[in-house]
Image (cartoon, grey):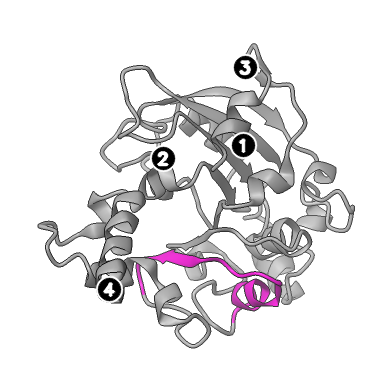
Amino acid sequence: MHKELLQRIDIKNGEIIDKFPLKELLENSLYYPACGRDGDPVWYSHNEIQSFFYADYGVTQKQIEESLYGTGCYGENITFRSSDPVGFKGYKVLGEKKLTSKELDPTGKIKLTTKRGQMQFVTDANYVRDTLKDWVKKPFAKWYILERQSEFNDAHGPKRFSFVFICADGVTTYKTLYNLNRISPKYLTIVNSGDGFGFNWDNFQSEDGQLCKTVFDNTKIPEALLVKHDIWTNVFHPSEKTLFEELEKCMSNVESEDMWETYPLDVYLDKLRKEIENITN
């Protein structure tokens, strides 16, 4: 969906020269709050998505770039599979660009790349002051464009994809990027919500949480959730609720029992659409 846009981006000596096309990249994107350095959703969505927005206030820029550029020695890395080497398998960083608060929020209401702005919508100020003060990292936002290496073909993934990492609160970031622009991500990913030992002030898996309320305060909502477990059951229609759960019902002929670990999303979607056509006809 972003193929032509990404091919036009001017990159020189590893730096993205062009202005950040915020609204264009937000359309049909995947948003992943409390993401850590989990790159699996990029693999799962395969060619279905080429624009990814990640948000986590517990990850530093150094950690992200150690993972992206393959210089880290950590157990948790941005990879297509846990067994792969550090980095996105089959991809290299073509260009990067630091993003300012103004580029992420032209209205100037939030200032995501400042400590004052990044947690503006947190409701429990005491928790932030007492518990999160040593956990929240220095705010930053950076845009990367990754290009597929020549030894891999279209079956592996898109030629290029956009990857934006924002060190900020997941709820605040969603409101800033999507609600203020009256856009929704195509897919919202919630894997490990980060509450408890993850030091998240909100429970992303709860229908009473601020993230869920924020999503439904917008004029548009995501097409589907990409989650491992059944969440938000009373606010999403069953067909929109947990995409993988619905796909599993029409994939009984697939040999693997572990869908989450085996097939990219576009393969699932193609089979799902055919199943729907057969039922309709």
Return the x and y of residue 160 as percentages of the image width and height.
Answer: 50, 30
Residue 136 in the magenta stretch? The answer is no
Residue 224 in the magenta stretch? The answer is yes
Q: Amino acid at mark 4?
A: Asn
For residue 77, the mark is 2
Mark 2 or 3: in front is 3
Return the x and y of residue 172 as percentages of the image width and height.
Answer: 71, 62
Q: Which residue is mark 4?
A: 281
The residue positioned farthest toward the bottom in the image shown: 234
Q: Is residue 39 visible in the rendered structure shown here? A: no
Q: Quadrant of residue 133?
A: bottom right
Q: Which residue is mark 1?
A: 61
Q: CA distance from mark 1 to mark 4?
A: 51 Å
For residue 228, the mark is none
**Which of marks 2 and 4 precedes in the sequence?**
2
Q: Quadrant of the C terminus?
A: bottom left
Q: Which residues are magenta?
A: 209-229
What residue is rendered at 86% in x and 48% in y?
106
**Which of marks 3 and 2 precedes in the sequence?**
3
Mark 1 or 4: in front is 4
Q: Amino acid at mark 2?
A: Asn
